[in-house]
Image (tube, rainbow, N blue to C red):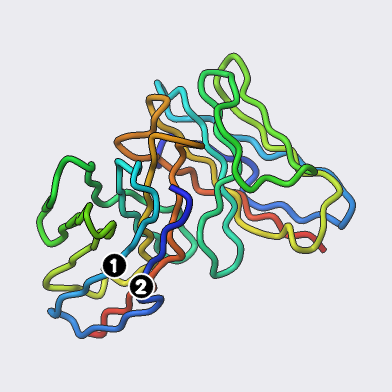
Amino acid sequence: GENVEQHPSTLSVQEGDSAVIKCTYSDSASNYFPWYKQELGKRPQLIIDIRSNVGEKKDQRIAVTLNKTAKHFSLHITETQPEDSAVYFCADRTDTGRRALTFGSGTRLQVQP
Amino acid sequence: DSGVTQTPKHLITATGQRVTLRCSPRSGDLSVYWYQQSLDQGLQFLIHYYNGEERAKGNILERFSAQQFPDLHSELNLSSLELGDSALYFCASSVGRQGLGGYTFGSGTRLTVV
């Protein structure tokens, strides 16, 4: 898509708590929404993704929800652990225009032990 | 190891110079994407190649160019370098043209312009 807004920019939680990161997209033609985790000094790694024909997807402690009407999607991490500390990026892809992933600005998650 | 290989890992060069960054995609992947990540910034899309052909351009400066070769490896050429070009440059690959299913990123090339 053209623009993806991500909030919050930083998030600190206690170990065991849940964390939620939200993204808003602008292009109604967006059809794919992945989330990436980037640990310090390392490459971004895909952790979960969702396509536009699905409202929710879960994988163990992480889940993604999509609200196409409101054009937003969220990452939910439950029972957070210190190793979840990283920068998380949302992204979207549209079927029009450049068709490459557009990334949000990232959320730095800190899980306090 | 993600299967996407980027070389070199680090590069230090002077302003005005020209450098070439290299990327070998994961075996079987036909698409290569280049992204720039400045300090504490997000990932800015530069360019996408699929099976040797340019598919899309993002915020790529005219001083930058890229190509994908018949063996599917790609090179990103950065010329007339400026201090502001210092960044981490990632390439990523995907199986198809559309990138559905996500990208696999390489470890990046950290470029420092002095």
Question: Element under label 2?
Answer: strand
Q: Secondary structure at mark 1?
A: strand
The residue lying toward the viewer, choosing from A62 and A32, is A32
* Position of residue A81 measured from the top left corner of the image (x, y, whole percent): 20, 73
Q: Are marks 2 and 1 in contact (CB under 8 Å)?
A: yes
Looking at the picture, does residue A61 appear above or below residue A100? below
The mark found on residue A93 in the picture is none
Quarter that holds the C terminus of chain A: bottom left
The numbered disc on residue A7 is: 2
Please tell me whether residue B8 is drawn above or below residue A107 in the rendered image: above
* Residue at mark 1: chain: A
> Residue type at mark 1?
Lys
Residue B110 pos. (x, y %): 63, 55
Which chain is disc 2 placed on?
A
Do the dots labelled 2 and 1 sit on one chain?
A: yes
Q: Which residue is mark 1?
A: A22
Mark 1: give few (<14), some (14-19) or many (20+) Cα within 10 Å: some
Q: Amino acid at mark 2?
A: His
Q: Residue furthest top?
A: B70
Q: Earlier along the polypeptide chain: callout 2 or callout 1? A: 2
Tell me how far mark 2 sits from mark 1, CA to CA.
5 Å
Q: Splitting the image into 4 quarters, where does residue A52 fall? A: top left
Measuring 30% from the left and 41% from the top, which residue is drawn there? Answer: A31
Q: Nearer the viewer, residue A32 or B74?
A: A32
Instruction: Give the residue displayed 27% in from the left and 52% down from the top.
Output: A47
Q: Residue at x 41, y 76 (%)?
A: A9
Q: Nearer the viewer, residue A61 or A81?
A: A61
Instruction: Characterize the local packing of mark 2: few (<14), some (14-19) or many (20 or more) Cα atoms within 10 angstroms.
Output: some
- Based on the displayed image, in which of its 4 quarters is residue A69 positioned? bottom left
